[in-house]
Every structure is written in structure tokens, then in C-alpha cells.
Amino acid sequence: MEQASVKLQIHDISLSFGGIRALQAVSFSVRRGEILAVIGPNGAGKTSLINSITGFYRPDAGAIIFDGRDITHLPPYKRAQLGISRTFQNIALYTNMTTLDNLMAARHIHMRSNMLTGALFWGPAQREEIEHRRVVEEIIDFLEMEAIRKTTVGSLSYGLRKRVELGRALALEPTLLLLDEPMAGMNVEEKEDMARFILDIHERQGMTIMLIEHDMGLVMDISDRVVALDFGCKIAEGTPDEIKNDERVIKAYLGQVQ
Ligand SMILES: Nc1ncnc2c1ncn2[C@@H]1O[C@H](COP(=O)(O)OP(=O)(O)O)[C@@H](O)[C@H]1O
Ligand SMILES: [Mg+2]
């Protein structure tokens, strides 16, 4: 594959916790501008993969190349600054704060490169704050969150909290979005909304998205390609149609207790 068309390259990464081999020599690429789904039974290593890409986990072996740059040894905040942003399988928001403040906090925490300047000069700090506010207001508009902008996140429905979390990930203005089961636990209507927002982000911003999802129907509907994991190993990679008919994938899923 031509290097320019590769957004993220996972090269032979392995990760163990004691005797548990969460990832075993996993390699694949995420192409620029695609939606890649990662599927696999519980415990297959999907979240560990996202944690390795964001730098929260350090693989024992292998390399991670982002936009042609080796980021294997960079700390999480540097990866975030380079454009990698994620949502969590279990929502991780400030529940006592409003939607607006959660999004603003994301920018303040991850983008304080000018903190010192900001503290010394009123002008630049003010300009930076206005820019943060502009980006956040755009996201609130885009994700149709006007009605909940001043609502405390803890009092929102599960589906809306997931949407705020997506907003928070977008507030970092990423070029690679990692979504860990963004639709899990949602009702049908919430799932449809979330799928629509993911597709909109992809289409309007040309965002590269890696998405972990259990619902095979949804995966088939929204992803360009699929990687399947089982017991930490990549067992298949291909188009949704190829994956749907792959013997090892079918077997891995049939063996799963739902
Ligand atoms: N921080 C951790 N400490 C110990 N074991 C872990 C940790 N994170 C993941 N694991 C183990 O690694 C394996 C893969 O987990 P995970 O990546 O969460 O799978 P998935 O997201 O596909 O369900 C599981 O056996 C899990 O128990
Ligand atoms: Mg997981």
C-alpha cells in the first residue's frame, strides 16, 4: 500500500498482562479517510488495541506509526496533540459539569501549549479562549446538543452522555478518531442517531475512524473494512462482506456466550 494513503500503521504489536496475552503480533493499517471496524468476542483485545494506540498501554513489542511518524514511545498527551482522540467503552466525563464545560475542559487539558503566554498576556489568552469557544460551539451545533449545552452531564440519558463523549473527542480536533463501542447499551433510536453522527463526521470532515463495535449489522452498514480479533490475534481482515463469510470469524462468534 502506498505510504501516503496510510493514516495509522500497527506493526506487529504484542501486549501481555502477567500470563494473559492481550495482543499477539497484531499488524494492520488504517487507511486515510476510511471507517475501519474492529470486531471480536469479549476479551479479544479490542480495547487493549485502542489503549496501545493512545499510549495508555505500552506494547511489549512492535511499533505504531501515525502519519508516517513512529509514535511508539510518545506519551499519551503528545499523541493527542498530534491528532489522535478517543471515546471510552465506559463513559468517562465530568458528571457534575455541563455539556459545554466538559467540551471546554477537554480543550483546556489537552491544548495548553500556550499556558505560560496565556498567564502573562491578557491578549493571547483571550484570543485562545475565543478560539476554544468557537470550536466547541461548532461541535455542539453539529451534534445537535443545543438543548443540553447547560445541562449537567450526570443528569443526561445514557445515549446523550455518549454523544457528549463523542463531542469531547471531537473538541481536540483530531484527524484520527478511535471509538470504543460507541453504540453499546443504546436503544435502537440512540444507535441510529450515533451511526448518523459518525457517518456525518466521516463525510463532512473526511475523518479517519477506527471503531470497535459488537453489532455485526451496524458494522456491515457503516464500515469500509473490518479487522477481526480473537484471543489477541488478528484472525481476518477485509471488506464487511468478506468478513461476514469468513469461517474463522463465524467460528469465533459462534463460540461466544452472549
Ligand atoms: N489493565 C489490565 N490488566 C490486566 N488484564 C487486562 C488489562 N486490560 C486488559 N486485560 C486483559 O486483556 C484481555 C483483552 O482485554 P480487552 O482489550 O479489554 O478486550 P476487549 O475490549 O476485546 O473485550 C482480557 O483478557 C483482559 O482481561
Ligand atoms: Mg473492550
Image (tube, grey):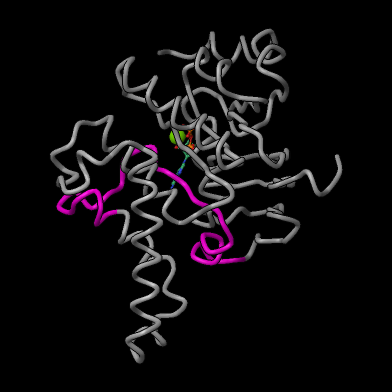
Residue at x 78% of width, y 43% of height: 5
Q: How many discs appear?
A: 0
Residue at x 61% of width, y 32% of height: 35
From the viewer's perspective, is residue 185 above or below residue 249? below
Residue closer to the observer: 115 or 52: 115
From the viewer's perspective, is residue 136 above or below residue 29? below
From the viewer's perspective, is residue 129 above or below residue 160? below
In this picture, residue 128 sits left or right of residue 77: left
Residue found farthest to the bottom: 120
From the viewer's perspective, is residue 100 above or below residue 229? below
Residue 97: % across, % down = 18, 54
Q: Is residue 121 magenta?
A: no
Query: Quadrant of the image for the N terminus?
Result: top right
Residue at x 71% of width, y 23% of height: 236
Say which quarter of the image contains residue 120. bottom left
In this picture, residue 181 sits left or right of residue 253: left
Residue 127: % across, % down = 38, 75
Please give the range of residues in magenta: 74-102
In this picture, residue 244 sits left or right of residue 79: right
Say which quarter of the image contains residue 254. top right
Say which quarter of the image contains residue 182. top left
Residue at x 34% of width, y 42% of height: 141
Query: Quadrant of the image for the C terminus?
Result: top left
Residue closer to the observer: 44 or 204: 204
Residue 243: % across, % down = 67, 15
Q: Is residue 78 magenta?
A: yes
